[in-house]
Image (cartoon, grey):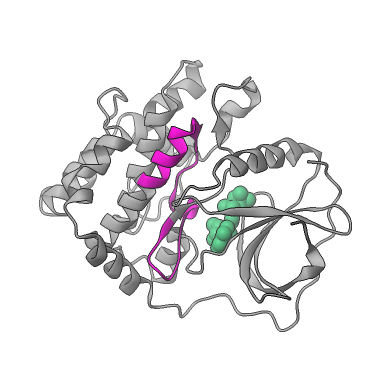
Amino acid sequence: PDFLLSDFNTLRVLGHGNGGTVYEVRHRRTAAVFALKMVRADVSLRHQVQREVDILRRTVGCRHVVRFHSLVRTPSADVALLLENMDRGSTDALLRRRGRRPFPELALAAVARQALLGLAELHSRQIVHRDIKPANLLVNSAGEVKIADFGVGKVLLRSLDPCDSYVGTCAYMSPERLDSVTYGADYDPYAADVWSLGLAVLELHQGHFPLLPEGVPPDWAALMVAICLGEAKGVLPEGAASDEFRAFIDCCLRKESGKRWSVAELLGHPFVSGADRDESKQALRDFLQDNSDESPVLKEPRKLGQIPPISI
Ligand code: ADP
């Protein structure tokens, strides 16, 4: 069924992305709560939104990908995506909310396993995410972890738009992908997603971006050196983490993409498969308990911005 913007009340702001704002909304008639992603769909973003919707439609049925319900019609034909509400937000926001206190390893086993399951679901549909990072791994109070944000995802086996090759967050890009940005070489996009996931999990373990010293704002040159020349192993010296965790990170962050483990192999890695599922989910739920810094509920439902029309 088609929804109208007026079918919903806005409860609070969940986050801001490149394209617009994400609100928590309640469906007036059923009281069901969703996330509503408004996209400022000016001409330059039209293509991106269209692709995101396209990809989201192909992910229906993926248990570890944030569920897309429908497009919402708005009076001015603005673009709004009705999404499953992930009520604990992103792992990135969680980290900040908790004063950058690292995630315990047991909780990270739940994050890594579910994010890998999400990647497996996407990769089996020939979708690469290309922007895996803590801000795009969302959690809910049931301890579920799902992959979000397909703004720069790409369906393979389609005519590729050369302008798309430079998007994504370069901090989480694999060495071979950075090479491809510089030299235009081909790379395996599935293995590149694995690198980004390994780096994201390592960031949650360290509490800050792991390849640069804490507090250093990432600039392009420093990042290139850290990613292409640095050794991820140096980040986790013996004793800094369990052997299983260090081995897991090593398997994700191998510089040569051919030596990096695949998603299927990583799902069988002792760090992920050895942890008791219920216990690790519980550890994640415990970590989620503190919600002191949740954004306040809006006093009045806010009028959602007027943005120019787009046809999808
Ligand atoms: P963009 O594509 O513009 O970068 P995102 O989809 O990444 O936007 O959303 C921005 C932020 O909004 C996320 O980091 C997250 O905190 C929040 N958010 C997005 N989708 C949801 C959702 N389904 N449930 C809860 N929070 C969400």
Residue drawn at x 64%, y 69% as measured from the top left? 13
Residue situated in front as seen by the camera: 146 or 124: 124
The image shows residue 238 at horizontal and vertical percentages of 11, 48
Quadrant of the image where one finds ligand 1: bottom right
The image shows residue 39 at horizontal and vertical percentages of 72, 52
For the N terminus, the quadrant is bottom right
Residue 174 seen in the current view: no
Task: Read off the magenta span.
Answer: 117-145
Is residue 114 positioned above or below 144 on the image? above
Label count reads: 0
The image shows residue 273 at horizontal and vertical percentages of 20, 49
Residue drawn at x 37%, y 30% as measured from the top left? 191
Task: Look at the image and say whether residue 144 sits in the magenta stretch.
Answer: yes
For the C terminus, the quadrant is top right
> In the current view of this chain or complex, which residue is farthest to the front?
1
The image shows residue 124 at horizontal and vertical percentages of 43, 33
Residue situated in front as seen by the camera: 279 or 63: 63
Residue 112 seen in the current view: yes
Is residue 67 positioned above or below 96 on the image? above
Task: Look at the image and say whether residue 244 sits in the magenta stretch.
Answer: no
Residue drawn at x 32%, y 66% as measured from the top left? 284
Left or right: residue 274 compared with residue 5? left
Give the image quarter of residue 288: bottom left
Residue situated in front as seen by the camera: 290 or 311: 311
